[in-house]
Image (tube, grey):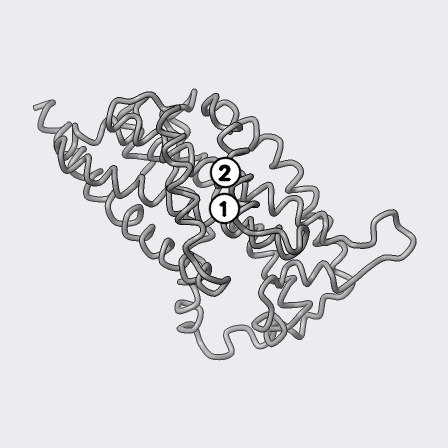
């Protein structure tokens, strides 16, 4: 996706897609991309509402939390990509600090034996388990539009590799410490095992004794950031595709994302919805960009000759 966008500096896929596969097919692919960003945005809004409702605002209706989240996000992104970039700059160092705090505090109750035996049933269960991780890594598809806003797009590949590596390291360490502390049997019976990890220890005498509060803060911030990016990308795509101003498009997406977010009846349906979004993302952003890149290179090579 990044290499594809690097061939069209200053443009998003919604603008340069027609140069590769023609106007109508490009519009169809763009609508699928936009639909994905709408769904992932609605999913993030619903998950955020579930977490806030369960841990912080017990008894508050989901619709109230989701509506508030969507309107606050609209305010945050209405000025464009600069606001989202500054939001990410604020969130990242806070994430690192809280993450390191979690690792340090949980090391006192970590049991290495809970991780054994490694690959006790062979490698195949590991491959089967990767399906559940797809949703955690699908945010990389923002590169179909993000490269157009970069000052140095030639460093796009490096940015993606570094970004995914940081995410991979974070996830890997969290998984190791959660299983090492709660054990496999303990993890599979919990809905929010990472938060339960933070609840499993306390240090009396400190100002703060409920350390899961810190994790909730950063978790909600991360969800909000992901929702903001998805919301903005979907709005930008529709505005560029139909040649409209982005502000009315943002307003138009508000009720649509709210309705999608409210569709799942319970938390199990929410997780099932997330699995569907992840599978669709594999096809849309794992397979589709490859032929587009090949067609683009062939067309440019033909134009030179």
Q: Position of residue 100 (x, y in %)?
A: 70, 48
Depth check: give the residue in front, 256 or 37: 256
Label 2–label 1 contact, CB within 8 A: yes
Q: Nearer the viewer, residue 211 or 42?
A: 42
Write down the residue under mark 1.
45
Residue sitting at x 51%, y 41%:
67
The single residue placed furthest to the bottom in the displayed view is 121
Residue 151 placement (x, y as % from top left): 43, 20
Residue at 40%, 58% in the rendered image: 273
Alpha carbons under labels 2 and 1: distance apart = 7 Å
In the picture, residue 27 is in which quadrant? top left
Instruction: Please state, as top left, top right, bottom left or bottom right, where the C terminus lies in the image.
Output: top left
Please tell me whether mark 2 sits on a helix, a strand or a loop: helix
Q: Which residue is mark 2?
A: 70
Give coordinates of residue 53: x percent, y percent: 61, 53
Task: From the top left corner, tell me how far across and down residue 118 is, in percent.
Answer: 55, 73
In this rendering, position of residue 229 left or right of residue 61: left
How many residues crowd around disc 1 within 10 Å: few (fewer than 14), some, or many (20 or more)? Answer: many
Labels in figure, total:
2
Crowd rating for badge 2 (residues with CA inside 10 Å; few <14, some 14–19, many 20+): many
Relative to residue 303, is residue 269 depicted above or below?
A: below
Picture quadrant where residue 132 is located: bottom left
Q: Nearer the viewer, residue 6 or 80?
A: 80
Asked if 200 appears above or below 301 in the picture, the reply is below
Above/below status of 1 relative to 146: below
2 or 1: tag closer to the N-terminus: 1
Identify the mark at residue 300; answer none if there is no mark. none
Provide the secondary structure element on which disc 1 rests: helix
Please give the name of the residue rendered at 14% of the width and 30% of the height, measured from the top-left corner: 23
Q: Is residue 292 left or right of residue 182?
A: left
Q: Quadrant of the N terminus?
A: top left
């Amino acid at each position: 996706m990044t290499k594809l966008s690097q061939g069209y500096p200053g443009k998003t896929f919604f603008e340069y897609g027609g140069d590769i596969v023609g106007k109508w097919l490009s519009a169809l692919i763009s609508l699928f991309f936009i639909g994905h960003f709408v769904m992932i945005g609605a999913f993030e809004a619903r998950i955020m509402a579930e977490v806030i409702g369960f841990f912080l605002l017990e008894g508050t209706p989901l619709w109230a939390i989701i509506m508030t989240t969507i309107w606050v996000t609209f305010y945050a992104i209405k000025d464009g990509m600069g606001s989202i970039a500054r939001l990410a700059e604020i969130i990242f160092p806070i994430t690192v600090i809280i993450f390191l705090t979690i690792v340090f505090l949980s090391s006192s109750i970590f049991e290495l034996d809970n991780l054994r035996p490694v690959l006790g049933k062979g490698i195949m269960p590991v491959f089967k388990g990767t399906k559940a991780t797809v949703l955690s890594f699908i945010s990389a598809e923002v590169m179909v539009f993000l490269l157009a806003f970069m000052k140095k797009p030639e460093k796009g590949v490096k940015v993606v590799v570094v970004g995914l590596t940081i995410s991979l390291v974070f996830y890997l360490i969290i998984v190791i410490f959660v299983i090492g502390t709660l054990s496999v049997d303990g993890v599979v019976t919990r809905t929010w095992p990472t938060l339960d990890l933070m609840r499993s220890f306390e240090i009396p005498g400190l100002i703060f004794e409920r350390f899961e509060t810190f994790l909730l803060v950063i978790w909600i911030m991360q969800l909000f950031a992901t929702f903001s990016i998805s919301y903005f990308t979907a709005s930008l795509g529709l505005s560029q595709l139909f040649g409209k101003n982005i502000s009315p498009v943002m307003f138009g997406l508000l009720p649509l994302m709210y309705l999608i977010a409210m569709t799942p009846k319970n938390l199990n349906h929410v997780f099932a919805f997330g699995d569907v979004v992840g599978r669709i993302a594999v096809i849309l952003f794992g397979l589709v960009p490859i032929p587009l890149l090949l067609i683009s290179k062939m067309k440019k090579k033909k134009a030179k000759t």
